[in-house]
Image (cartoon, rainbow, N blue to C red):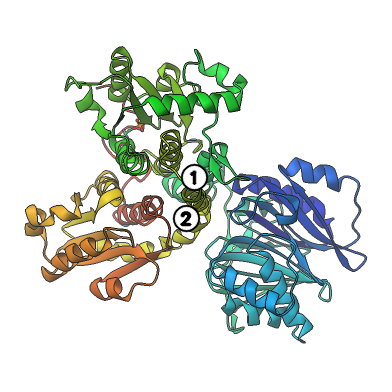
Amino acid sequence: MCGIVGYCGPENPVDVIVQGLKTLEYRGYDSAGVAVLNQGKFKRIRAEGKLSHLEQKLANETFDGHLGVGHTRWATHGPPVEKNAHPHAVGSTSIVHNGIIENYATLKAELIDEGAVFTSDTDSELIAHLVDKAIAGGKDLFHAVIEIIPKLEGAYSVLAVNEAYPEEIMAFKSGPPLVVGRNDKEVVVASDLAAIMPYTNKVFFLQDEEVLHVIGTKIEFFDQKGQKISKKETVIDWSPELIEKQGYDHFMLKEIYEQPRSVAMAMNPHIDLESKTVRLNKVGFGVGHVEELERLDSAADWQNTLNIFKSVKRVFMVACGTSYYAGMVGEYLIEQLSRTPVECDIASEFRYRHPVIPENSLVIVISQSGETADTLAALRLAREAGAQVLSICNVKNSSMDREADGHLYMNAGVEVGVASTKALSSTMALLNCVAMAMAKAKGQLPEDQEAELVESLLATPSHMESVLAYDSFFAEAASTLKDFRGFLYMGRGVNYPVALEGALKMKELAYMHAEGYAAGEMKHGPLALIDESMAIIMLAPSDELYDKTVSNLEEAKARGGKIISIGSGKNEKLAALSDHYLALPEVSWTINPILELIPVQLMSYHVAHSLGKDIDQPRNLAKSVTVE
Ligand code: AGP
């Protein structure tokens, strides 16, 4: 997940682009760069690390052109070194890219066979090669882009420029967002609104498979075949409340859309991009006060965490509500990766069931607020029993954060919607890191498996951006979905907690009957619920339980249930069995729950919205349940 900006107009493009990148720095900040016209050529300046490093390098540079592109990077392919920073330049072409080109290995091999020389380890560079090759073959910039788009598979939002077309920017996308705004003297294209608002509040949101052609201050839209299309302009009403909601109707929708960012922010402190390894950062087991965490030596603290994890004989996950479902995902991850026994409890049960907490136990408490009474009580009970307690919170210095032995942070930013969304996906990302760390400590994580899992985790924010495209599907489907008698969410294994979460969201937002079930449990009762008035949501990714899950889906289908299935990639069989099939990117089983969250969140949001419910403050609920 990266941030991209393009500018054409009378200002110094560097000023506009760098200012825009600053508003996008949350999207990635392990390197950045600009390519801006100077004396008819694109001058490219790139820097590793934070945007401030690029600004230092730019301080001594001058540019006389009025067009350029810029990029701030979240590395998925290739370490965060200068040669991998965008823009990528080939011949007279420069491009910036946000996303993942799934078929990059094939395309790169073909280009190398034709004599192309690659200077980076990234997937993005091949786009510059393809565009420059098409222009060298006689196409203009517009037609070169139209020619190469069909070759790309995966998620992408791209800006492409070429020295022979000094007033033109081509932009195209499939997945990650792109917005364009213009006034009577300039055009700004960017990954999100924040970079455009200083110049205009009249914008166009590019939809997937749309192409934008900027020519000076003129903008034109096309489909991917090059046929002109017309688009409706959106005027952003930047009222104070809307600024807070960043143009979304509700905080919950804004927070659903923030998830690629918050998942990135959750994992970032704990992943070593160079070595593609996990190393939990400043967990602070044994440190007296959280204020001391910042002063910890990261390497020594990591060794301390490994030593503690190595000695752990049993793990307890304890939380409430949505956070409890995060804990359930953690149970599958930690147990399957580290082979350490894990049990997951609802805090209000754990604190009263006189739990047996043996020596060398680790109790992980999860709480967005860090103040939930039952979870806090469980923490205190665990500490009295002599267990090490690790808290995963979204609020630093909250009660749980202060009283725990070890500390991890969701880094999700303020979560205003009472219905928790980004806190959950951030916690799932963190629990991936905890599970890998535990497995590493116990010698259960071979290096190649660790690298594979880390790469899959790093690619997650980009994949999440693609899945957000289902927003429009559920906006349309909601008017039908709201008429169902009830909803049955089902999944197996690590997907089962997402079924529970989907049902909880439908309950707490639309106030409709919804059940989450382990799909294997259908024949033990829930099957009796199913008829055509019941909507079935089946989580059926291509993991080791896929075949069994499809059998459960066929059982539901045979009884007339209306089925929305959520699976991996193109899947004719699932599509044929379902009334609606939603394809997710094919990822590791450890990541599926994070991607599955988005459709179930969007579904409950739009059904509740179509019913006129109070989305951000559902009846009878509170954001933090600080009493029993
Ligand atoms: C989830 O949408 C609810 N808001 C609720 O279940 C919440 O997750 C639960 O109360 C736990 O809150 P916490 O994460 O702050 O401890």
The image position of residue 300, as x and y in percent, is 57, 24
Could one spot residue 337 in this view of the protein? yes
Q: Based on the displayed image, in which of its 4 quarters is residue 270 positioned?
A: top right
Up/down of 495 relative to 541, above or below? above
**View quadrant of ligand 1:** top left
Up/down of 42 relative to 422, above or below? below
- Rounded to the nearest angstrom, the CA distance separating label 1 from label 2 is 9 Å
Q: Which residue is nearer to you in this view: 580 or 336?
A: 336
Residue shown at 54% from the left, 73% from the top: 209
Secondary structure of the residue carrying numbered label 2:
helix
Mark identifier at residue 263: 1
The image position of residue 355, as x and y in percent, is 20, 22
The quarter of the image holding the C terminus is top left
**Contact flag, marks 1 and 2 (Cβ < 8 Å):** yes
The image position of residue 15, as x and y in percent, is 80, 50
Up/down of 314 relative to 472, above or below? above
What amino acid is labelled 1 in the image?
Answer: Val
Graded by Cα atoms within 10 Å as few (under 14), some (14 to 19) or many (20 or more), the crowding at tag 2 reads: many
What amino acid is labelled 2 in the image?
Answer: Met
Q: Which residue is nearer to you in this view: 351 or 261?
A: 351
Secondary structure of the residue carrying numbered label 1:
helix
**First in sequence: mark 1 or mark 2?**
1
Residue shown at 81% from the left, 57% from the top: 13
Relative side of 483 to 295, left or right: left
Mark identifier at residue 76: none
Relative side of 394 to 192, left or right: left
Up/down of 368 relative to 590, above or below? above
Residue shown at 48% from the left, 47% from the top: 450
For mark 2, what is the residue?
A: 464
Q: Based on the displayed image, in which of its 4 quarters is residue 71 positioned?
A: bottom right
